[in-house]
Image (tube, helix red, strand yellow):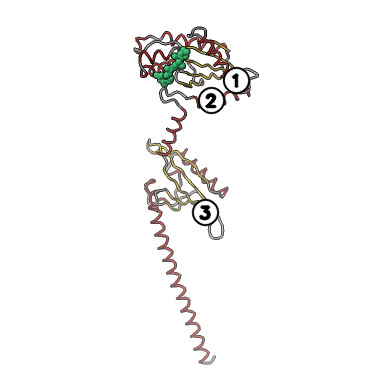
Amino acid sequence: MSIDNIVLLLAVLLGLVALLLAVHLSENRKDRAKKQQLNSYEKILDQVGAYIYVKDVKGRYVYGNQLTLDYFGVTLEQLKGTTDNYYFSPVVAEILQRNDRKVLSQQQKMSDDIFVDNNGLHKVFHEVKQPLFDEKGKLIGLIGISTEITDEFNLRSELEQLANSDPLTDLYNRRSYSVFSEHEFTKAKRISSPLSMMIIDIDLFKNVNDTFGHLVGDEVIKRVASICDKHIRETDILARIGGEEFAILLPDTDIESAFKLAERLRVAQQTHKAEDDDLPSITISIGVSSLQNNDNSFNDMFARADKALYLSKHVGRNSVNVA
Ligand SMILES: Nc1nc2c(ncn2[C@@H]2O[C@H](COP(=O)(O)OP(=O)(O)OP(=O)(O)O)[C@@H](O)[C@H]2O)c(=O)[nH]1
């Protein structure tokens, strides 16, 4: 090999080393840049008001943002490799892990509301989980984002409760009564079980208002509701369906039993001792009906009970009729 060739080879090798060094250096810089980028992403995630976490395919935590770490009371190093069993009751952990398995097996995003009992405090979280894949498309775990929705959930429940109940008596309102009735009507027809109902109307209630005032009238309505409530079964549905009008749906009850209950209610309202609450005495009229073979909808039954109530009023009130 001539000197010229050796010099040339050396030059080429030096060039290669220089290139390798340059690549290596730039790799380090890239790594550092990547690390810096990751750090700043993590800092951003720490400021998000949501619990963000990453789990591997076995459901073990790989990452959790600061909110998650604070909630679990661990550092990131302590979090790594742990599972939900460390942080939640067995029931909640099972729900969370079932959701993880669903996301991982179906490789699809999912969301769920989770109820957690945290040292006696009931909290509700909305969680969204999504599968994670590497650059080659291989499943490597999942990412989850949970937000606490306890306040929103409680508000929603309260609004639902308000929409379904009567604020004066706390009984179901007419709307709820219709929903329950339709449901029970369909069920009773399907399994051929008896179903009865009654409509109760306070007699001459206008006189109560006119004589004692509207507030006393309200208290009387509440007392009527409470007396009815004491006489019915758990499965019966008592509702206030109008101003001084109530209805009771009686699943699994034939017409004779419904009539007997109506009589008991009528007597109970009439004999309620005035000294018990200083409120004026009242009487009630009742119309009773039962499911018949040719009924097409619950309205047919309701219309018969209404007709029977009209009869009770017509014969002088304080009575029970069946139609
Ligand atoms: N205090 C009070 N009164 C109500 C309420 N809703 C309806 N009413 C009153 O109930 C009365 C019902 O009167 P009517 O429909 O004439 O019937 P009634 O006086 O009970 O007579 P009969 O039904 O024929 O026995 C009216 O005076 C309404 O103002 C309520 O929430 N509170």
Residue 54: percent from the left, percent from the top?
46, 52
Give the quadrant of ligand 1.
Answer: top left
Q: Position of residue 288 (x, y in %)?
A: 54, 14
- Give the residue at mark 1: 300
Q: Residues within 10 Å of mark 1 (few under 14, many from 20)?
A: some
**Is there CB contact under 8 Å for labels 2 and 3?**
no
The percent position of residue 196, horizontal first and vertical second, equals 56, 17
Q: Residues within 10 Å of mark 2 (few under 14, many from 20)?
A: some
Amino acid found under the numbered disc labelled 1: Asp
Q: Earlier in the sequence, mark 2 or mark 3?
A: 3
Total marks drawn? 3
Q: Residues within 10 Å of mark 3 (few under 14, many from 20)?
A: many
Determine the CA span between mark 2 and mark 1.
13 Å
Q: Nearer the viewer, residue 300 or 130?
A: 300
From the viewer's perspective, is the residue at label 1 or at label 3 nearer? 1
Q: Is the CB atom of the residue marked by disc 2 within 8 angstroms of ligand 1's nearest atom?
A: no
Q: Which residue is mark 2?
A: 178
The residue nearer to you, when weighing 173 against 268, is: 173
3D distance between C-alphas at marks 1 and 3:
57 Å
Q: Which residue is mark 3?
A: 132
